[in-house]
Image (tube, rainbow, N blue to C red):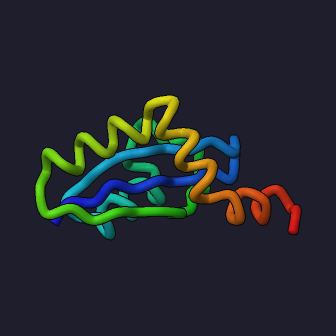
């Protein structure tokens, strides 16, 4: 099983999108500062993930989510979360 996931940085309010075969381990690596791209952006919240049986499907989804259309999808999909994170109800 492969996972596409989105982390939200509480420090800079930005998102990190990635994919992995072991979501729990990868999240622990991120939160413990073992991933260079997120090391200085902690604390991080896992706000979204999707599961795939095929690595290629997961990679394609990761690439889409990193695109402009993907960012719009995330914003729409996670609208309630972002309103709550910004302190709005």
Q: Residue at x 71, y 65 (%)?
A: 80
Q: Residue at x 51, y 54 (%)?
A: 7
Side (left or right) of 70 relative to 45? left
**Quarter the N terminus occupies:** bottom left
Task: Give the camera-side residue of 64 and 8.
Answer: 64
Task: Give the camera-side residue of 74 and 17.
Answer: 74
Q: Quadrant of residue 63?
A: top left
Q: Quadrant of residue 65?
A: top left
Side (left or right) of 74 relative to 50? right
| Percent of width and height locating residue 67 | 45, 31
| Percent of width and height locating residue 39 | 49, 43
Task: Give the camera-side residue of 84 and 22.
Answer: 84
Task: Give the camera-side residue of 64 and 36.
Answer: 64
Q: Residue at x 32, y 69 (%)?
A: 24
**Quarter the C terminus occupies:** bottom right
Q: Is residue 35 above or below residue 85?
A: above
> Which residue is at the far top?
68
| Percent of width and height locating residue 27 | 39, 61
| Percent of width and height locating residue 35 | 38, 44
Q: Is residue 73 above or below residue 37?
A: below
């Amino acid at each position: 099983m492969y996972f596409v996931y989105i982390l939200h940085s509480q420090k800079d309010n930005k998102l990190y999108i990635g994919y992995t075969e072991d979501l729990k381990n990868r999240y622990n690596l991120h939160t413990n500062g073992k991933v260079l791209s997120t090391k200085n952006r902690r604390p991080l919240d896992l706000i979204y993930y999707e599961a795939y049986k095929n690595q290629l499907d997961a990679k394609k989804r990761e690439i889409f989510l990193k695109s402009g259309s993907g960012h719009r999808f995330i914003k729409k999909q996670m609208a309630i979360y972002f309103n709550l994170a910004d302190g709005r109800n």
